[in-house]
Image: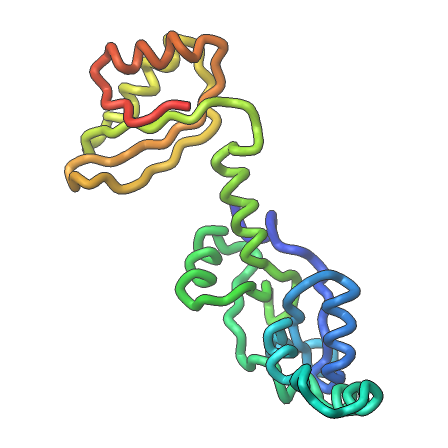
């Protein structure tokens, strides 16, 4: 799965010369938390978040009247509070590459840029949705965890067994095992004979860690 399949196309954006109040209004109107910032409506130069705006806003304890607060917010420009040179990703990049950037850089979203043009935005929520889809969690089926020796052909042996019981494999993922010589395989399966399949896995000698 690549970024293009999960990103939001034609994202709402602001120009660097727009006021902070306009950015606030756009975030509220569209119920979003991030706005790409463009220069002259074309080149990406930054990103402004809900958090940036809160930090730059007057304190709730201020003695200013509401009209004075609005006046100040209208005078502050987006370019004064935005994060410059934001991390970006291309629409053709694998979704896991984008997830790694978001995790390592501790950011909430990635503007998607192709050939210097903003084509979308990818958020943490989009990445989580992609993970849920890849794992088949939202659909029917059963989840099983099996610990296997970390060597070629082991998963194939499990799949051969499942095939004998007419099991449909929805998804396969892996995770580390406490023993470096083993690996945990997480499978989501569809079957009409779940109890029989679970018993067959145990009987075959595979280390079934969990099944639900």
Name the side, left or right, on which 109 lies relative to 193: right
Q: Nearer the viewer, residue 1 or 67?
A: 67
Q: Residue at 72% of width from left, 80% of height from top?
A: 15
Number of marks in picture: 0
Q: Residue furthest right?
A: 67
Vertical placement of residue 58 versus 97, above or below: below
Q: Colour scheme of this structure image?
A: rainbow
Q: Position of residue 123 (x, y in %)?
A: 58, 58
Vertical placement of residue 99 versus 197, above or below: below
Name the side, left or right, on which 66 lies relative to 38: right
Q: Position of residue 204 (x, y in %)?
A: 24, 12
Q: Nearer the viewer, residue 11 or 108?
A: 108
Name the side, left or right, on which 205 lies relative to 197: left
Q: Position of residue 64 (x, y in %)?
A: 76, 92
Q: Residue at 49% of width from left, 19% of height from top?
A: 190
Quarter of the image for residue 163 reads top left
Q: Residue at 19% of width from left, 30% of height from top?
A: 149
Q: Position of residue 24 (x, y in %)?
A: 73, 75
Q: Residue at 42% of width from left, 58% of height from top?
A: 100
Quarter of the image for residue 179 reads top left
Q: Nearer the viewer, residue 65 or 75?
A: 65
In what quadrant of the picture does the C terminus appear?
A: top left
């Amino acid at each position: 799965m690549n970024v293009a399949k999960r990103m939001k196309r034609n994202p709402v954006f602001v120009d660097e010369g727009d006021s902070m109040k306009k950015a606030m209004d756009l975030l509220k109107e569209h119920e979003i938390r991030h706005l790409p910032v463009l220069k002259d409506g074309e080149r990406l130069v930054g990103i402004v978040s809900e958090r940036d705006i809160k930090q730059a806003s007057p304190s709730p304890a201020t003695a200013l009247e509401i009209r004075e607060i609005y006046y100040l917010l209208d005078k502050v420009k987006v370019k004064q509070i935005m994060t410059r040179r934001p991390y970006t990703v291309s629409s053709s990049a694998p979704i896991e590459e984008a997830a790694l950037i978001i995790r390592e850089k501790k950011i909430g979203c990635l503007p998607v840029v192709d050939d210097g043009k903003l084509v979308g935005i990818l958020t943490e929520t989009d990445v989580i949705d992609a993970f849920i889809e890849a794992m088949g969690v939202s659909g029917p089926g059963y989840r099983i965890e099996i610990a296997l020796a970390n060597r070629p052909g082991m998963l194939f042996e499990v799949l051969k067994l499942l095939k004998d019981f007419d099991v449909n494999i929805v998804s396969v993922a892996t995770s580390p095992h406490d023993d470096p010589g083993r690996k945990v395989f997480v499978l989501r399966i569809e079957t009409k004979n779940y109890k029989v399949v679970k018993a067959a896995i145990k009987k075959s000698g595979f280390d079934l860690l969990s099944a639900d």
